[in-house]
Amino acid sequence: MVSPPEGVRIGKYRVLRRLAHGGMGEVFLARVDGPGGFEKTLVLKRVLKKLQGDPRFIEMFLNEARVAAQLSHPNVVQIFELAELDGGYVIAMEYVEGLSLRSLMSAVKQKHVTVSATMAAYVCAQALRGLHYAHLLRDDRGRVRGVVHRDVSPENVLLGFNGAVKVADFGLARAAEAAIDHAPLGKVTYMAPEQRLGQLIDARADQYAMGVVLSELLTGAPLSGLSGRPRLSDVTLDVIVGRALMPSPDGRYLSAGEMADGLEEYVRTNSDANATRLGDLVRIAAVKLDTEGEQTPGALTQLTLPGHVPEVQSSAPEARASDVLPVLPSNPEPVRITAPTAPPPRPTRWKKAGALVALALAGLVVLGLVLTAPPGPVQSFERPDLLAVSPPRQQERPTPAVAAPVPSTQVEVRDSRPEPVVLPAPPGPKPAPRKTGHVQVRVHPWAEVSWAGKSLGTTPCPPFELPVGRQVLTLKNPELNLTREVVVLVKPGAEVSVFENFLK
């Protein structure tokens, strides 16, 4: 299939340029026109003609595209239309003006920009929110569809100039697998162990892939295998990544949302990473990459295809790059700030201080008559960090005519107030031992929890407070038509965890 030149239409869409091509299809930047000067820029993905003769591929491609079209979330690339145009299947989807996470990582590797640990956590948390939404997508009957992305990678995480984080290409890797006899397609570096082995996978495979992405963002290098994960200097992030990369799915987080919770708490605790700062970072990286001739700002929605080969766009005019953001130096010289000269002290404040010092010195002169040492010159009051203020000059007092030092009679001033009497606190009743404890219930994928015939809620949910002793919890999942009873020993003031996997 020959690529259409710029300006040629595919159905109602006018092609602006091709963004990428691969073994599954082509990706174009296009525009749709409407009445009254209406225009909308979007992305077209067209399936290659050679694949349209494979009934297995077409069936799965259409099924996956229909499901993906139901996704509507701020962290997911929106699909507008699935149609058959000009003898081929086309998907029209949202255009994200910015960079892919892979392009941002390339800018980091070239030392154009720096991504902090908290910004990396923020980006991955946003992507996990989109994945979690997709994992819980339900059909018209309220049943979970079981959507799994299967190809989470830096190429499929898009970052907008407005700070948006969006996951692209849900389910299309699964359709591509049908074209090559169900061989697991995707990027092996980011595959969970069960996916590499061709086993049945669930949403936790996407969580594993996002753990690999986060590790690569933090260390600057891809993982070299299950035993090659480098330890992170930040303990909190090391724990989060380590749990997401557990070889067994049962050892990972129960959901992508739970992993996102941990990352968002880290961001709140350590910095103010947000969409505004991310947008600024993406703009700077885009300008730097454009300067290097690697990518044109604004042409970055390169939605990946299995085996895709991104095209190098021609450099945009200089005015285009300057419109995005001024180029900032990658290694600016340190700014030396000279300490300002200390301002003179406020006169009103120290006039009052001088008066107080004068009164104090006058009292000392009177007491000097009865002290053992002869009266000496009065020392001026000074502060090392401020200008000294001398008290008003006092008239010199004549020295008493005393031939010999005053006898060693000292005047001792005693405090006439009695010492306070500290009474011991009266013995109070001992606190009664707690008669309840807490139970944290986790069920995959979910369950309704009840105790003694009373509904406690639906997982995921906060810990329950139950009486001490052996308690029986009833876990019910109507979708799977499964009910289980779990016996748990509740201890006073303690919390115990219960985990059940309804898929086993």
Image (cartoon, grey):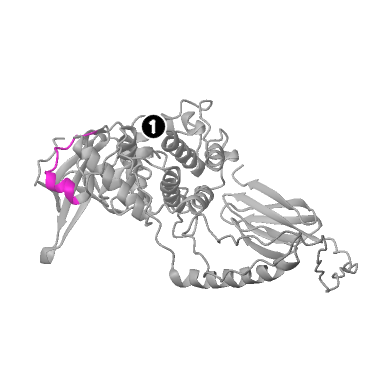
In the image, residue 349 above or below residue 250: below
Residue 480: x %, y % from top left: 58, 51
Residue at 41%, 30% in the rendered image: 221
Give the quadrant of the N terminus: top left
Mark 1 nearby-residue class (10 Å; few <14, some 14–19, many ≥20) = some
In percent of width and height, residue 374 lies at 70, 60
Residue receiving disc 1: 187
Region of the chain picked out in magenta, as a range:
310-323
Q: Nearer the viewer, residue 270 or 440?
A: 270
Q: Residue at x 30, y 54 (%)?
A: 162
Front one among 446 and 333: 333
- Which residue is drawn at the image coordinates 64% and 60% (left, top)? 376
Q: Quadrant of the C terminus?
A: top right
Q: Amino acid at mark 1?
A: Lys
Vertical side of 202 occupied by 469: above or below: below
Q: Is residue 56 visible?
A: no
